[in-house]
Amino acid sequence: MSGEVAGGRTAISGEERPFLPGMRRNWLLPLYDPLTRLLGIRRVHVRLLGQAGVRPGHRVLEIGCGTGNLLLAAKRSQPAATVVGVDPDLTALARAQRKAHRRGLAVQLDRGYADELPYADDSVDVVLSSFMLHHVPADRREPAMREVRRVLRPGGALHLVDIGGADAHADGWIARRAHRHELTEGEVGGGIPDLLRRAGFLDVSETGSDARRHVGRFTFYRARA
């Protein structure tokens, strides 16, 4: 995989452009991990990793890895996999790097954007995406998914979870907050299967959902290259 970094350090490259941080404001980042624990996101990650079925020797990429929770869970679940995370937020990447060091987990962390992935064609077996897609500006979502398709090996798969889904009334306050931001206008939720098909994926399916009172609906998807 191109862009490889030894020792779990963070590679910094690419242009600067606006992005939506995990907590919408950089100064709120310390609250991100406590909030995800409160919302039960760890269980969501366990379910997504169960769906992905990462095996020894797999090359795994998480797009929008943030502070590294899913990334590190993937490495813990399959130590013999090569696990890489990419995110535009240097502050979040630094936090992910510290967590990886404390836990003795060797992962690669790269600074980059989902629509310009710094990796070679056909170089990844599994791509993970957890609550990332709604952070991507509407006009960059299809290019981002085309990039995911490009880096996946034939037969590789994208495993994605995000807010919303076919039952729009269950989107909840997370979705309402996301769609109020100028960078994230436009449909995510129920539009994801069509988006993935336009990007060239095969066998696109909605694999399940998890509705939480006052929080909303989390929906899981799988698609193959």
Image (cartoon, grey):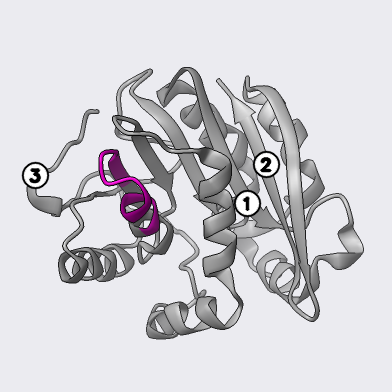
Callout 1 crowding tier (Cα within 10 Å): few <14, some 14–19, many ≥20: many
Element assignment for label 3: helix
Q: Quadrant of the N terminus?
A: top left
2 and 1 marks in contact (CB < 8 Å): yes
Disc 2 designates what residue?
221
Tell me the CA gap for discs 2 and 1. 6 Å
Query: For the view shown, which residue lies furthest in the left direction?
Result: 7
Callout 2 crowding tier (Cα within 10 Å): few <14, some 14–19, many ≥20: many
Q: Which mark is residue 6?
A: 3
3 and 1 marks in contact (CB < 8 Å): no
Between residue 104 and residue 97, name the one nearer to us: 104
Q: Compared with residue 110, is residue 97 higher up or lower down, i.e. above or below?
A: below
Disc 1 designates what residue?
161
Tell me the CA gap for discs 3 and 1. 29 Å
Q: Residue at x 65, y 55 (%)?
A: 162
Q: Position of residue 99 (x, y in %)?
A: 24, 70
Q: Quadrant of residue 182?
A: bottom right
Three-letter code for the amino acid on which mark 3 is drawn: Ala
Three-letter code for the amino acid on which mark 1 is drawn: Val
Question: In this image, 182 relative to 49: left or right?
Answer: right
Q: Residue at x 74, y 76 (%)?
A: 215
Question: In this image, 166 relative to 192: left or right?
Answer: right
Task: State which region is magenta.
Answer: 73-84
